[in-house]
Amino acid sequence: MNSTICPKCGNETPKLFQGRCKNCFLETFTLAEIAPVLHTKICSSCGARNVKSKWVNVGSLKDVVVQAAEDALFVHELAENIEVYVQPREATPYLFKVHIEADAILLDEMFHQDLETEIRVIRESCDMCSRISGGYFESIMQIRATNRIPGDEEKIKCINIVNDVLERMRNKGDRLAFISNTAEIKEGTDLYLGSSNAGRHICKEIVSRLGGSFTESATLQGRKDGKDVYRVTFSLRLPEFMPHDFIEHKGRIIEIRKFGKNVSGIDVETGARFTVAPDELDGARLLINRKDLQKTILVAIENNDLLVLDPDTYETVTIKKPIMFTAEAGTDIPVIKTEKGLLAVADVSK
């Protein structure tokens, strides 16, 4: 078996560890080291932490302190099966006393070491919050609707989708995924976004969930670092018709149920399913929304016919019983007046 001489003690050893035999190496061995005082920067607004000149989302202030200690801890390069326990104690909102316990195996022996450090928290505004407070934006998203004004409920749905998309992007590290300003105007809502990438992702998500379409146009704003700088405007158009709108389309009375890549609904007269591409609704006419339907008394049910009172003249008229109709005589039922006459509407809540 080959051996060598330890230059420190002169004994034979099968292997040198950093130029010494095992015993000499362990005499001056230190498992872990950390500076007695550390500094970490966090954003006073969002809590992000500055790591190597880059702002990242870590979590709570305690998480930030633990991460700062772990990042600064040096563990010997030969150590294996390392386990580190970090226990921060808040002395002030700007100062944490941190106790660290480190366990590891080295040269087939288990080592344990206790360390203490002090972490001082420096609070300042991160890149994202600085941009938001300064009104920074790279794109404008215009929320509109085709041939109408978006309703409050629709706008709330859009804003919820916007926030969901931006949160997902920030969790993936996009520091420009934010809204710097919101403007409510007569035609809809304008959102000023930190990046064109965010605007594009948001528009695609809204169209996927609510239907509609969007276009984008770029305007040259100047040059920075030798490159052209553009500002992008996204024009989002929500569908002309909303779920539970009743429309007249090519002689048929349709209740819209869902918008997406296709428009789906129900034929009020036959109960047949209705599915078309959004652009196939050109020429369709809005009649009324379900919430605005008139109600009248159902006098009697005779086979496939309903006897009802006309809500305007109060005369008894006979109309066709719709598919999936469950109301009983003597109750109020929703009806819609069309060029074809009075039509009963099935109750979708049952």
Image (tube, rainbow, N blue to C red):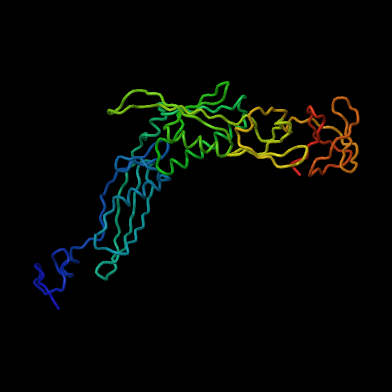
Residue at screen point 76% across, 31% down: 293
Percent x, y for residue 335?
80, 33
Percent x, y for residue 249?
70, 31
**Can you tell which quarter of the image residue 172 is in?**
top left
Q: Nearer the viewer, residue 212 or 86?
A: 212
Quadrant containing the N terminus is bottom left
Q: Is residue 229 above or below residue 116?
A: above
Q: Nearer the viewer, residue 35 or 128?
A: 128
Percent x, y for residue 83?
34, 61
Q: Is residue 179 above or below residue 29?
A: above
Most distant residue in the top direction: 186
Most distant residue in the front direction: 250
Residue at screen point 30% across, 53% down: 116
**Can you tell which quarter of the image residue 207 is in?**
top right
- Judge left or right: residue 207 versus residue 111: right
Residue at screen point 35% across, 27% down: 229
- Judge left or right: residue 320 versus residue 122: right
Percent x, y for residue 56?
37, 42
- Judge left or right: residue 221 versus residue 24: right
Most distant residue in the bottom direction: 1
Q: Nearer the viewer, residue 68 or 166?
A: 166
